[in-house]
Image (cartoon, rainbow, N blue to C red):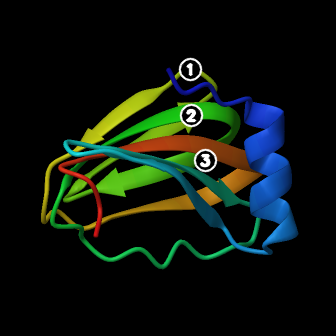
Amino acid sequence: MKVFRLDDLEAERSANQGAYLRFLTERNMSAGLYALSPGDQDTQQPHAQDEVYLVMSGRASITVGTETTHVARGTVVYVPAGVPHRFHHITEELRVMVVFSPPEA
């Protein structure tokens, strides 16, 4: 069993001064914590993997392909592999759990 505490992951991500912290890589999936502040630019490029976002805190909009929706704590978004996507109009500190399958390279 592997157990992770969100506060510990956030502290590690912040200490490394990056927006993204990959904390788990397994044979069929990987997981990370993504953080964006109001005014930040989400510079993601389409990924080769399917992706699921779980918004842990904050408020923003996300555009996936040609569809846009608002997200907040508890929102789950699926992004198919190869589809352009980005968070924008971030109004509160955004913390997102990210799961890739297969694992990101």
Circle 2 packing at 10 Å, graded few (<14), some (14-19), many (20+), is: many
Amino acid type at circle 2 is Val
**Nearer to me, 80 or 13:** 13
**Nearer to me, 86 or 81:** 81
Q: Quadrant of the C terminus?
A: bottom left
Distance between the alpha carbons at the discs numbered 3 and 2: 10 Å
Asked whether, in this view, residue 77 is left or right of residue 38, the answer is left
Above or below — where is 19 with respect to 58?
below
- Residue at 62%, 59% in the rendered image: 89
Element on which disc 2 rests: strand
Amino acid type at circle 3 is Ala
**Nearer to me, 23 or 64:** 23
| Residue 53 location (% of width, % of height) | 42, 39
Say whether marks 3 and 2 touch (CB < 8 Å).
no
Asked whether, in this view, residue 72 is left or right of residue 58, the answer is left
Lower position in the chain sequence, tag 2 or tag 1: 2
Element on which disc 1 rests: loop
Element on which disc 3 rests: strand
Circle 3 packing at 10 Å, graded few (<14), some (14-19), many (20+), is: many
| Residue 17 location (% of width, % of height) | 80, 75
Distance between the alpha carbons at the discs numbered 1 and 3: 12 Å
Asked whether, in this view, residue 52 is left or right of residue 3, the answer is left
Q: Which residue is mark 2?
A: 55
Q: Which residue is mark 3?
A: 60
Distance between the alpha carbons at the discs numbered 2 and 1: 6 Å
Amino acid type at circle 1 is Gly
Q: Which residue is mark 1?
A: 74
- Residue at 26%, 54% in the rendered image: 103
- Residue at 23%, 67% in the rendered image: 47
**Nearer to me, 35 or 69:** 35
Lower position in the chain sequence, tag 3 or tag 2: 2
